[in-house]
Image (spheres, rainbow, N blue to C red):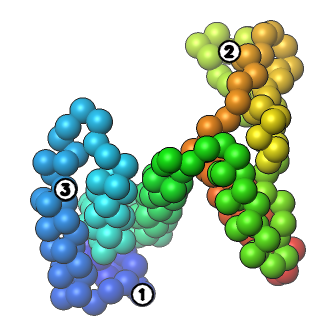
Amino acid sequence: MSDNDADPISLPEDIATQVRQLAEQLHDVLSKHMSVTDPVPQAQLLWQAAKLINTAAGGLDYATGTPADQRFSRWWDVADIGSDIAGTAMQIAAQGLTVEHAVAQAESFGALDTGFTTTIGATTVRLYPKDEESTQTLTVSVDADPLHPLTVTANHGAAPTPRPYTPVSLLRVDHAMRRLGQALGDVVDH
């Protein structure tokens, strides 16, 4: 099955082939940078971008399932890789920032966003340890004020010790909350 059979609105095969070749060239350029123990985030980001390009251009084999399942899996993977790229970009953006500076950057960026002002919030995380009976529900709150630490509360058992967030964790949470806000806005608008 060709890529065009699985996705009727995909790139023409000759263009998809050229794009996959470019992704392979990028992969080859980055291989030596990614083979080290701790690759720099910039190399990781470009590596992830090569994976995203290759996947979006139909370079991975999704031969199992119906054509609709294959198409969904492919684009789910593209979205997942895009999320990894966003996380790596936030790591790069946070390099050299103090927590206070990261807060100021997140808040000033939030001021530029019309219609969406919430920068930081809370989420619930459910932990599934090996022993299902001791499943713990955690509520994680991040406050934009650097004097307030990231806090974790648990429904039972000991909660992890509250600890201050880092510039990277602050920017990643801020980015995720903005995306969530945009998605919720789309739901309300439509």
Horizontally, is 75 left or right of 155 in the view?
A: left
Q: Are marks 1 and 3 in contact (CB under 8 Å)?
A: no
**Dot 3 lies on which element?**
helix
* Foreground of the two, 5 or 98: 98
At a point 66% along the width and 43% down the height, the residue shown is 99
Give residue 30's mark: 3
Can residue 188 be seen here? The reply is yes
Q: Are marks 2 and 1 in contact (CB under 8 Å)?
A: no
* Residue 15 x %, y %: 23, 87
Which is more N-terminal, label 3 or label 1?
Answer: 1
**Dot 1 lies on which element?**
loop
Badge 1 amino acid: Ile
Which is more N-terminal, label 1 or label 2?
Answer: 1
Badge 2 amino acid: Glu
**Dot 2 lies on which element?**
helix
Give residue 9's mark: 1
Residue indicated by mark 2: 132
* Residue 105 x %, y %: 67, 60
At a point 27% along the width and 90% down the height, the residue shown is 12
At a point 85% along the width and 76% down the height, the residue shown is 115
- Other-residue count near label 3 (Cα within 10 Å), few / some / many at <14 / 14–19 / ≥20: some
Q: Are marks 3 and 2 in contact (CB under 8 Å)?
A: no
Camera-side mark, 3 or 2: 3
Horizontally, is 75 left or right of 35 in the view?
A: right
Look at the image and tell me in which quarter the C terminus lies.
bottom right
